[in-house]
Image (tube, rainbow, N blue to C red):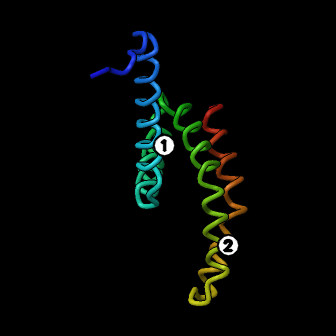
Amino acid sequence: MTSAPRRPPHRRRCAALRQAQALRADRAGRSCRTPRRLVLVSGAVEIAAGAMLLDPRSRRFGGVLAAGLLAAVFPANVQMAADGLRSRRAPAWYKIGLIARLPLQAPMIRIALKAVRS
């Protein structure tokens, strides 16, 4: 019985590292794909940012966190508005609310950044 030629140790480590990185990237991608998990995580970050804005010692970081969160969720809000407008079952008041909240994000980001400077 002949055995397969063995790779040098440094090549085995590189191959094992590539496999571990691919597995970690796959797991990280799967864990963040669920919409419910994203909503829960963004809600927790929003609560944390609000709490940080209350304390003067953490206000600077809380403002940056709040502004970043508002900027990060803006594309999801645009998608939600687009989906809501296409829906035949959504009531008119809901569609108006979806559209009306989009331009309000810019002043909210500005206010969060103002907290950073204070």
> Residue 13, percent across and down?
41, 16
Which image quarter: residue 3? top left
Residue 104's label in the rendered image is none
Provide the secondary structure element on which disc 1 rests.
helix
Which residue in the protein does label 1 denote? 49
For the view shown, which residue lies furthest in the left direction?
1
Q: Quadrant of the N terminus?
A: top left
Q: Quadrant of the C terminus?
A: top right
Say few, some or many: other residues with alpha carbon within 10 Å of mark 1 (under 14 / 14 to 19 / 20 or more).
many
The residues bearing labels 1 and 2 have C-alpha atoms spaced at a distance of: 27 Å
> Residue 23, percent across and down?
41, 37
Left or right, 8 with respect to 116, comes to: left
* Residue at figure coordinates x 45%, y 43% from the top left: 26
75 shown above or below 55: below
Which residue in the protein does label 2 denote? 82
The kind of residue tagged 2 is Ala
